[in-house]
Image (cartoon, rainbow, N blue to C red):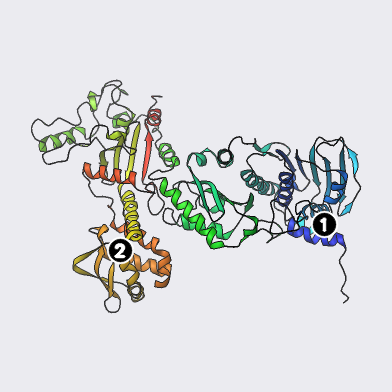
Amino acid sequence: MTIRLLPPVLVNRIAAGEVVERPASAVKELVENAIDAGASRIDITMTDGGRARILVVDDGRGMDPGELSLAVERHATSKLPGDDLLDIHTLGFRGEALPSIGSVARLTLTSRAAGAGDAWALTVEGGAKGEPEPASHPQGTRVEVRDLFYATPARLKFLKAPRTEQMHAVDVVHRLAMAHPAVGFTLSDGTRQQIRLSGAQGELFEARLTRLGAILGREFSDNAIAIEAEREGIRLTGHAALPTYNKATSAGQYLFVNGRPVRDKLLHGAVRGAYQDVLAHDRNAVLALYLDLPPEMVDVNVHPAKAEVRFRDPGLVRGLIIGALRHALAAAGHRASSTVSLAALGALRPAEGPRSPALPWGAGGYGGGASHPGLEERRSAYAAQAPAGTPDPWAGRGAGMGAGAGSGQAAMAWLAGAPPAAPRLAGEPEAPPTGAEDYPLGAARGQIHDTYIIAQTRDGVVIVDQHAAHERLVMERMKAALAERGEVARQILLLPEVVELDEPGAVRVATAAAELAKLGLVVEGFGPGAVVVREVPALLGDTDVKGLVADLAEGLAEWGTAQALEDRLGDVVATMACHGSVRAGRRLRIEEMNALLRDMERTPRAGQCNHGRPTYVELRLGDIERLFGRR
């Protein structure tokens, strides 16, 4: 066979296969050109999912006839004035998009340069270029793509349904809109607008959050924390959602490098590392991060689609992202996402049909009537044990609850089966001091099912999962001890505990003995299939040693060898904290409940446990009153 040069039209069609994979790819390239041209508004229309027609209109700088003709030539660009691929300040730079699109479709460009009196149009059909002709158009550029892939019909077979292709384009435009909040965007399928975004005003940080709220929803903007950090010339900004606002996939993670939307495994890995001990392994953080760094520190010329990048110092970038996210999450303190409360309120819908016999105020709504079932028995049992003269904690409830008595909070507490904490008996702790409701998590008023603490704030109710909350507190204390002293304080067991495991499990635990000792757990091999525990972390108190070691043995099988354990200390600490925290089912005294609440307020990341579940739910009084029709 004789080697020959391929004709230019065929070369462009081959290139188009890399640059224009689907209609959304064409939209991306055309919108990026509009942004590079300084457009403040970009309108996109797609017909039949982009197969039949793609129209992109912008109000950017526009082009004169000479530039219009050059724009559809392969590798012709205005974006590399110095011919330096390491000095790129624009989204486009390869000069491939328009000739690639023109080689597989019917392309028409109409443009009017800034300050010019006339507009010009040029057509390209299947790679055959026409000449510029006079046209009518305001300043800016109009690009129309018809019959995409008509010149390469095999490519059409790989396209999905029109709706699917349209959704891919929506995602592309959303990502570009997040990166450039000052630009207004619309996207229509010819019958209805799927995107309508006005250019955000104000300072860049605010404008970005406004744009993110418009795209990701108000729930994201309400639960986002600001991210801002800089290291060695690299600046990271953006917004990240609280851990309790998360998704099942990583689709809610948006990453931008110098204004360019990218999909980078290093960046996604850094996000997972930052959320490692505040998010369950099957859940994913929601965030938008913007990385700005000198062009020479990143290579964007990795793939024709320009969605991948390579960093000169990936370790520096990864460390910056992890450090900034962890710092911001710690600074958020005990805060949990508002969606947790909204979900709780959604579950507290009024029951259907009459339920008045089960209510403390009887059949007449707020009027008098039959007592709550069990009320008299509970009052009698209490009265039999209480000292003479002790006031009845249920006084005013039951039949005595007249019209207008009580509040949404009292009703919620009653329906939950939790009357206010009983009056102090001899030897019992004092009630919370006056004004304790002013604390962020309020003052403890009772405990239900020996698992959930009910606290009253100035304007609502807080329900705390005591095990989840204490689990986070223990973990943070252990991490702080590791950071300060390099090890966790230990407590010697009066009688060493022998834990029987399967032989591989015992070997794994014994092999990791040195690393576990730093965390306060001193273990030794004790023959085949067993280990002996001599010391435990002092923070854990009275813990289930056998259960803890068994869980660690299973975890070590997943985490790898003892050499890899250094990288998984967070998982080990989380396992220990889970076993060392206040268990569900333990009865707490009022001062213990309040101490737990105050510790939560002082502890970073206390809004979620080590597995990413919320530690508390806050219900505002106004929301509770709406449940009962008071508002």
Lower sequence index among marks 1 and 2: 1
Image location of residue 75, percent across then percent down: 80, 57
Relative side of 66 to 16, left or right: right
Relative side of 119 to 472, left or right: right
The residue type indicated by label 2 comes to Leu
Q: Which residue is mark 2?
A: 548
Image location of residue 36, percent across then percent down: 72, 46
Q: Which residue is mark 1?
A: 74
Q: Residue at x 57, y 54 (%)?
A: 233
Say if 265 sits above or below 111 in the image.
below
Residue 537 visible here: yes
Q: Nearer the viewer, mark 1 or mark 2?
A: 1
The residue lying toward the viewer, choosing from 353 and 149, is 149
Image location of residue 32, percent across then percent down: 71, 48
Residue extending farthest bottom: 527
The residue type indicated by label 1 comes to Arg
Relative side of 423 to 138, left or right: left
Secondary structure state at the residue bearing disc 2? helix
The residue lying toward the viewer, choosing from 537 and 340, is 537
Q: Quadrant of residue 629?
A: top left
Residue 269 visible here: no
Secondary structure state at the residue bearing disc 1? loop
Image location of residue 42, percent across then percent down: 72, 40
Q: Residue at x 32, y 51 (%)?
A: 473
The residue lying toward the viewer, choosing from 571 and 397, is 571
Mark 2, other Cα within 10 Å: few <14 / some 14–19 / many ≥20: some
Q: Quadrant of residue 158?
A: bottom right
Q: Quadrant of the C terminus?
A: top left
